[in-house]
Each structure stands twice: as C-alpha cells, then as structure tokens.
Amino acid sequence: MKSYNLTQFRKDLSELSIELDKNQEEQFMQYYELLIQWNEVMNLTAITDFDEVLKKHFVDSLSLIKAVPELLKEGYSVIDVGTGAGFPGIPLKIAFPGLKVTLLDSLNKRVKFLNEVIAQIGLADIDAVHGRAEDYAKPGLFREKYDLCVSRAVANMATLSEYCLVKVGGRFIPYKSEKIEEEAAAAKKAFYLLGGEVVENIEFNLPYSDIYRSLFIIRKKAPTPGKYPRKAGLPAKEPIS
C-alpha cells in the first residue's frame, strides 16, 4: 500500500472528536484503494480524488457522531439502507469497531464489492446483503430489528421512512446535503403513520469546508402498522403524503 498524507483527514476527524489508531487509518486507505480499483470497471462513485473521497465520503459518513454518541457503544446495531459503495456503513464500522452493521443494497455487483472490502480489510460483525428495503422490512426479516437506520440515498424522506427497520425507541437518520424543510414537512404524515416523529435536525458544515450537511433524527415511538411497507417500487413512486 502506498503512502498517503493524512494530515487534513486527522484534523477533520479531530473536529468530530474521533481519533483513529494506525490500523484503522490503514483500513481506510485500503478501502480507498479498493474503491478506486473497482470503480474502473463498475460505477461506484463519481468522486475519486483522494482528498475529496476522504472529505465527502469518509468524514461525511463519520459526521453522524454529532447526532448519535451511541456509536461508541459495543453491540449497537446499525443498518445502512441503499449503501451503494458502503457509505456510511463501512466508515462507521472502521471508526467504531464495536458496532454491528448491516449493509443493504439492491444491486448484487455492489454487494460483491462490499464483501471484498469487508474481507480485504478484516472487518467483523458486518454483513452485506443483496435486496430491496421494501422486502427486508417485512415481518420475519429485518423489520424493527435495529437500533439505528441510516441512509445517504437520494430518495425523499417520506419514501425512506417507509422502510421500517428500527425497533421502537430506535432512530432513523437520513443524511441530507441541502436544506429540506419543505421535504421534511411533507413527510410528517408518513412519519406519523409509520410510528415515528422528528425530534431534531442537526445542521453543520463538514470540518474545514463550506460543504453543508443536515441530519434529520426521526425516533420510532410506536410499531409500524402491518400494511407497511407497501410492495416494491410503490414507496418511491407514490410517497405517503
């Protein structure tokens, strides 16, 4: 593995009160190299510049610590819906190794990439699963199983909230890159019907940048009615309104 300048990466993480050991830094660099290698033959990310990957993928993923100090707890369970190239799930697992992480993606070739990353950098208590959230949110699979559900997918909040994967008392947090008060307001009915409520919106810029981010914290206060989620495709095509 080649040598990398991690000065800015370390400064960024220090702003989030995160300090990595040498092994964790090496895992992030291995992840970066695998991402670039696989990206040559499949579409994983449009962001390939080293410093941009560190800031816009790795640091961005880890900014969740601003909303969820429980990431430091051993055995805290997290599912990353529509994980794509593994963001935010894999960076969270590297930085907070006590987490139990599930990566869910609908494209099998991306899941093969994720499994390669998991094997190559030696991660445990993390699974990459091929499937749609609508299917895995049904009884008997991943429904209401997790402490936390996260997503950096671009779907709107009403659609994402229908993937009912957190237990009562758990939280769903979509990462957003623009101000979306209107989207959140439109999704309030969906949150209510599905047993959730918005408790906070944390807005900030990524460290040493003008890159805006927001984390909407939706708490699960009641079980989701049995008729949700609807069949595959409907949550995206006809969001609850």
Image: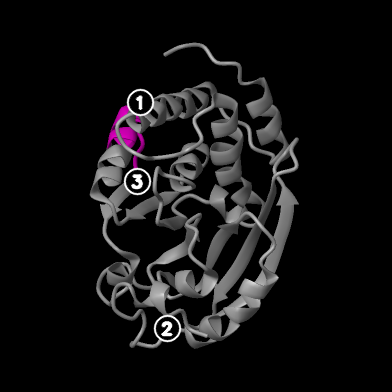
At label 3, which amino acid type do we have? Answer: Asp
Question: How far apart are the alpha carbons under marks 2 and 1?
Answer: 41 Å
Q: Which residue in the protein does label 2 denote?
A: 224
Pick whichever, 91 or 125, lies toward us. 91
Q: Is residue 119 magenta?
A: yes
Pick whichever, 48 or 15, lies toward us. 48
Q: Which residue in the protein does label 3 denote?
A: 125
- Secondary structure beneath dot 1 equals helix
* Start-end of magenta stretch: 116-126
At label 1, which amino acid type do we have? Answer: Gln
> Can residue 102 be seen here?
yes
**3 and 2 marks in contact (CB < 8 Å):** no
Pick whichever, 8 or 102, lies toward us. 8
**Between tags 3 and 2, which lies in front?**
2
Decide: is 220 above or below 35: below
Horizontal relation, residue 240 to residue 200: left or right? left
**2 and 1 marks in contact (CB < 8 Å):** no
Pick whichever, 76 or 47, lies toward us. 47
At label 2, which amino acid type do we have? Answer: Thr
Residue 18: x, y in percent?
A: 64, 37
> Can residue 164 be seen here?
no
N-terminal of the pair, mark 3 or mark 2, is: 3
Q: Which numbered circle lies on residue 37?
A: 1
